[in-house]
Amino acid sequence: MLSTAADDQDDEETPPDRQRLRAIFISDLHIGTPGFQAEALLDFLKNHPSDVLYLVGDIVDGWQLRRRWFWPQSHNDVVQKLLRRARKGCRVIYVPGNHDEFARHFVGHAFGGVEVLHDTTHTTAKGLKLWVVHGDHFDGVIQCAKWLAYTGDWLYELSLRLNRHLNTVRARMGWGYWSLSAYLKLKVKKAVNFISDFEVAVAQEAKRRGYDGVVCGHIHHAEIRDVNGVLYCNDGDWVESRTALVEHADGRLEIIHWGGQAGVLSLAKSMKVLQP
């Protein structure tokens, strides 16, 4: 196998101020689209070693690749990075989503050390039992009107294209990264209501199944909060917000905004509610 930039980065030592994490949860990379921020993710993974890495769906964007092939070297580097991580002893678990639903045909198998599961359970150092699932099954548009989801996906890609041009200008002016698409999403009342309804639906199902909380992706909106006594965690995405959910050695959960201006969201209140 040819050496890649990802391999070279893995050979470097982890910065001394970075402690090993118990777990990392990332989703909605959308590899195979121009919107995927591959270099930022490579930098994040280089700086954050972990015992377990959960890939919580929409890792490869099969929808976009069917329409137009887009696969630069940086995207290949990310794939190589994930495979190398598995070879180096990190447990890598892949829970497919709707954009990479083709991978659901391989549930129960492992490829290059990466386990493919429909959903899974993660138990934190504090004893919280979390359900790990992508979350598209709780999206009525995906389940009942897939043609509308495809149309929305096209419009979303258009907004990301505008977002890239906008941030090129911002970078030249010395300003930080800012997500136009995330801003528009939260300004539209129906989108806000959809996010709230989605969170409640996922949390209710986690509670029905006997879990203390849930970790999901799908809606590209990173958050940690209590939903009717259930810990709801969404790890966000790597096309808009560049976010990941991480668990520290002491069981503390955080959402990290890598290279962004939003800072870090901590678990605080939710942990007090759900202490075992």
Image: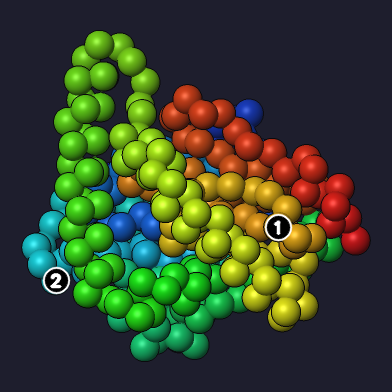
Q: Secondary structure at mark 1?
A: strand
Q: Residue at x 47, y 58 (%)?
A: 194
Q: Which residue is mark 1?
A: 227
Q: Residue furthest front?
A: 189
Q: What is the x, y in percent for residue 208?
A: 72, 79
Specify whether 29 is left or right of 166: right
The reply to whether dot 2 and dot 1 touch (C-beta < 8 Å) is no
**Residue identified by numbered label 2:** 66
Quarter location, residue 206: bottom right
In this orientation, does residue 38 appear? no
Left or right, 227 with reference to 151: right
| Place of residue 1 in the rendered image (x, y in percent of width and height, measured from the top left) | 25, 63
Above or below — where is 228 with respect to 140?
above
Report the front residue among 152 and 256. Answer: 152
Q: Residue furthest right?
A: 276
- Quadrant where the C terminus lies? bottom right
Q: Nearer the viewer, residue 270 or 33?
A: 270
Q: Residue at x 13, y 57 (%)?
A: 70
Camera-side residue of 108 and 110 = 108
> Given the image, on which type of amino acid does mark 1 rest?
Val
